[in-house]
Image (spheres, rainbow, N blue to C red):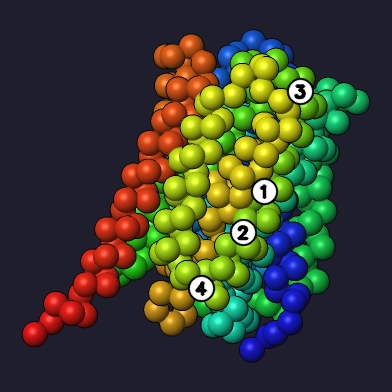
Amino acid sequence: MLSGWLPLLITLLIQSMVSMALLTLPVMAPVAAKSLQVSPALVGPYVAVSYGGALMATLLGGAMVARWGPIRVSQMGLLLCAAGLLLCALPWLPAVVMGAVLIGWGYGPITPASSHLLARTTPADRMAIIFSVKQTGVPLGGILAGVVVPLLLLQMPWQAGLALVAAACVLCALLAQQLRAAFDVDLQVTRIFRMGSFSQPLRLVLAHRPLLLMAACSFVFSVVQMSLSTYLVTYLYDDLAYGLVAAGLALSLTQFGGVFGRIAWGYVADRWLGASRMLTVLAVVMALCALATAALSVATPKLWVWIILIVFGASAIGWNGVYLAEVARQSPPGKASMATGGTLAFNFLGVVIGAPLFGAVSSWSGGYRAGFLMLAVVAVGAALLLILSHRKATAEPTASP
């Protein structure tokens, strides 16, 4: 068994780059939308298309990892993200749509690949904290997008900024090549992909109640997470009169909160609360922060805005490590990547449905406040689901004769 920090560092870097690739165009939305002569609210459908592609790819993630190995699958994902970013740079909406699909195809298999690698190299008593540290790659990528992309827009056209991020993805894929011999082992080189490869991860999740609970939670939480990450810059820019750089900084603060949260919640879950109670607490915090964000105004001091957004990010972006560690822990032996792919399909479905719904609610109401109120409602629903499931699991041993 491979040990040490190298698997964690590799997966963290790759996760950061694909996360940055996914969020680059949403951060550029106010500028890119003017150039394309479309509404910035279309960033919601863009994210939905990306995650629709990710949903398809993640269902094949387990089979792809078994066939080619986690490093090769990660390289393929990085190159697909790069190609998608270059397509998005073309001033033609169909090209942007296809670019969103390619970015989704690249993003989807990354987490199943990393879960396979880490489940094979991580001791059981450190699962939550190691998976949580790895998942900081998602908010770290958001920080890079929130800080670097607005600065690029001040120096060059938005299309050139997309090309630079694509080049960074290609460079990351090249750096990973030297690690294939060490980590891409025990490959099923004769494996053939069939239609059953799509349904097998879902059947695995549906057959195991703990996995199904994690899948349901990831569905709801992903609605909150991606709505926040996708629409925050536009909300601050349009409704609260923030400049683009200041709005990008605010997005980075939420991602910074997510970095802190993913590590802290993993430690707390391992040591004290367990996954179910930890996720229940986070659902309640998400609901409160969504209400506070909806109540922001132009007159709200920036310090208070930053505090609210950091806490919002810590909860809405910080839950994933606890969830993924619990999925890996509950998975049958050798099926961590397949179980992760199955639960992530629900995660991505939440994004596909949630981001356009947030945009539709906001457009219908004439502002983004109603969208944040919707997030509070769905977060409360997730908290109730976790509470009921925990009570049922606690009562079951005493119910037997």
User: For the residues marked 2 and 1, what is the alpha-carbon distance in whole angstroms?
Assistant: 9 Å
Most foreground residue, 397 or 181: 397
Q: Which residue is mark 2?
A: 262
Pointer 4 or 2: first along the chain:
2
Kind of residue at disc 4: Trp
Mark 1 or 4, closer to the camera: 4
Q: Quadrant of residue 31?
A: top right
- Identify the mark at residue 39; answer none if there is no mark: none
Residue 189 drawn at (x, y percent): 54, 76
Residue at screen point 78% across, 51% down: 170
Residue at screen point 49% across, 39% down: 288
Q: Quadrant of the N terminus?
A: bottom right
Kind of residue at disc 2: Arg
Pointer 1 or 3: first along the chain:
3
In the rendered view, tell whether residue 308 sits above or below residue 113: above
User: For the residues marked 1 and 3, what is the alpha-carbon distance in whole angstroms?
Assistant: 20 Å
Pointer 2 or 1: first along the chain:
1
Q: Quadrant of the C terminus?
A: bottom left
Circles 1, 3 touching at the beta carbon (< 8 Å): no
Q: Which residue is mark 1?
A: 257
Kind of residue at disc 3: Leu
Q: Which residue is mark 4?
A: 272
Q: Which residue is mark 3?
A: 244
**Secondary structure category for the residue under label 1:** helix
